Image (spheres, rainbow, N blue to C red):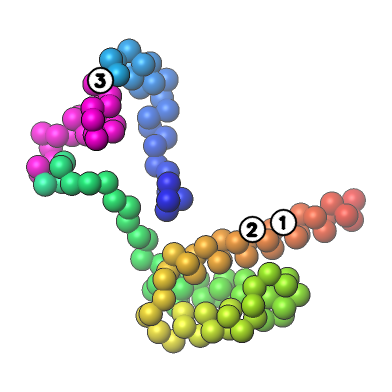
């Protein structure tokens, strides 16, 4: 959840939920092992080092996409006039961020994604509010 990625839809099937409710708690949670039933279901299929390792997230390789397929989106959301009119971010900071994205590989892709997601949300909210004002 720290990475805003949720892929648990199959666990919402009512048959799976009913089965999970029928199991004793100590089978579902055992000490430090949360989601024990899910891990146990695949224990025979996975190598021991994978089964026993701590939980960790993963990064989607966005850095390359920022320089290619997402470049026009970045330019739109981080447009200097838009940033100045918005009055949320420091325009110089955003200008430096864009330069860093397009000219280096030395940036936190998750930080950039957070800024872009916020800008996308802001722009959609602004358009929705303007549309309602016209009604």
Residue 89 horizontal/vertical position (percent): 64, 73
Image point 72% across, 78% down: which residue?
84
- Specify whether 113 is left or right of 77: left
| Mark 1 to mark 3 CA distance (whole Å) | 46 Å
| Residue at image mark 3 | 26
User: Which mark sits nearer the N-terminus, 3 or 2?
Assistant: 3
User: Which mark sits nearer the N-terminus, 1 or 3?
Assistant: 3
Helix, strand or loop at disc 3?
A: helix
Per the rendered image, the range of residues in magenta is: 26-48
Q: Which mark is residue 125?
A: 1
Q: Label 2: few (<14), some or many (≥20) within 10 Å?
A: few
Q: Is 38 inside the magenta-drawn segment?
A: yes
**Mark 1 in CB contact with mark 3 (< 8 angstroms):** no
Q: Is residue 15 visible?
A: no
Image point 27% across, 46% down: which residue?
55
Of the pair 96 and 44, the residue shown nearer to us: 96
- Specify whether 38 is left or right of 5: left
| Mark 1 to mark 2 CA distance (whole Å) | 6 Å
| Residue at image mark 2 | 121
Q: Is residue 21 visible?
A: yes
- Specify whether 134 is left or right of 15: right
């Amino acid at each position: 959840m720290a990475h805003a990625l949720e892929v648990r839809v199959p666990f919402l099937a009512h048959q799976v939920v009913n089965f999970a409710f029928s199991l004793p708690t100590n089978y579902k949670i055992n000490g430090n092992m949360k989601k024990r039933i899910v891990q146990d279901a695949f224990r025979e299929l996975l190598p021991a080092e994978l089964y026993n390792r701590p939980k960790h997230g993963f990064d989607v390789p966005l850095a390359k996409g920022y320089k290619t397929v997402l470049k026009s989106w970045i330019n739109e959301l981080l447009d200097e006039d838009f940033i100045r009119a918005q009055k949320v971010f420091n325009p110089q900071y955003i200008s430096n961020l864009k330069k860093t994205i397009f000219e280096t590989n030395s940036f936190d892709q998750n930080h950039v994604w957070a800024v872009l997601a916020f800008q996308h949300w802001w722009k959609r909210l602004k358009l929705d509010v303007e549309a309602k004002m016209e009604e």
